Amino acid sequence: MFRRTLQGKLPQRSFFLFGPRQVGKSTLLGGLKTLFTVDLLDPEKQLTYIKDPTLLSRQLESLPRKGMVLIDEIQRVPKLLDVIHGLLEKQPGLNFAMSGSSARKLRHGAANLLGGRALYRTMHPLTLEELGKDFHLDWVLNFGTLPKIYTHLIQGKEDVAQDLLRSYVITYLREEIKAEALVRNLQGFQNFLDIAAAQFAEQVNFTDMGRECAVAYSTVREFYSILEDTLMGFIMPPCLKSLRKRMSHSPKFYFFDNGVTRAILGTLKTAASPLERGRLFEQWFIQEVYRMNAYGQKDWKLSFWRTGHGAEVDLVIERGREILCGIECKFKKTISRADLSGIDSFRGVYPKKPCYIVAPIEIPLTMDGIKVLPPHQMLEVLERF
């Protein structure tokens, strides 16, 4: 139904494709011409390969020595990577497409990551461009853009979409966290997840969160690391190039999808307050930039800028050591002079850097040299960076 950004653009050589559950990885990879497929979501197959990873090598012996082999959910049997490594060395014509919904077991379990023989790609929920004419800002803010969820919204099945989002969170806790034994204290992690969701798009105070969750400061940091490794979101650090002593060093955390965020909070049936809608708009737009960076391989570094006096710009985009621009997100139809205060402070430090405000307006405008753009036009500008 949706044409994905990666469609027709996957590497011809071996690659990893990581992305959260239900973003469409299996559907995308299903379009590849493959010699052999291993679906590790199948419990029986998973157990078989856990017991004997070398079975894969034997299964491929009778097949052509050139082509693509698909391994779905590779993180469930990391030892398969040792077998794949050996096959890549012995059979240069053989390539592997390996998907995963969590990189944690591979990164932290000393798994063989194939020594640079496989490229790395990521997949995300639907982008504004992928949604095209089906884009509705209210749906995106309230229910996110996971393909299956959004399809139900298009079909007028909002209740089904809500049920699936609730199930998504339960499945994440049961299968990604509990079954993979990523934490010893599941209840502590669940308490943390509730608080993290309540504080999305805000600066993280690890000490205060630890106190609320009744866990150590270091445990809170580890829990955020788990969220990142299981692809539930990303940490965004402060921009510290100058005014270092005046800026806060606390990062922000953004979840990968607004619908999942609201499902964790239990607010899917509740109308979002104006303040929450503003934060959801900020989170969604930064998700869009994060996805553009990944899909376009732009090598951007994303951060936010904040002074000790509280002046803030939501998003700073850098490449290398160069700041490319600053962007403030405002969920307002009418922008006033007061809305420029954060950008004004930023321009005082970086007077030559372009600055923008992104807002849900229909007609672009300029105020004091600052362009105010609707989301799709702001993304078009960024595409050229």
Image (spheres, grey):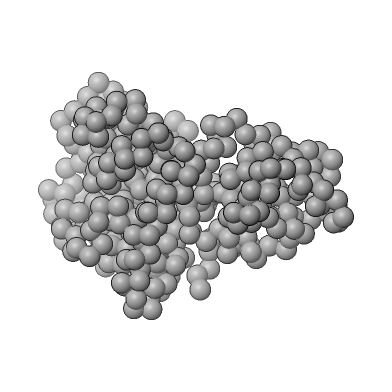
Residue 370 showing in the rendered view: no
Is residue 235 shown above or below 284?
above
Q: In this figure, what is the number of numbered marks?
A: 0
Percent x, y of residue 309: 15, 30
Q: Residue at x 23, y 58 (%)?
A: 267
Q: What residue is at 62 percent from the left and 43 percent from the top?
A: 77
Residue 173 horizontal side relative to residue 280, left or right: right
Q: Position of residue 156 (x, y in %)?
A: 34, 78
Q: Position of residue 140 (x, y in %)?
A: 33, 63
Q: Nearer the viewer, residue 244 or 325?
A: 244
Quarter occupied by residue 186:
top left
Residue occupying the point 66% across, 43% down: 50
Left or right, 129 with respect to 329, comes to right
Q: Residue furthest bottom?
A: 155
Relative to the observer, which residue lies in front, 91 or 310? 91
Q: Give me the residue at 38% from left, 64% from top.
A: 164
Where's residue 54, x and y in %? Answer: 76, 42
Q: Is residue 338 visible?
A: yes
Figure check: 101 above or below 350: below
Q: Residue furthest top?
A: 245
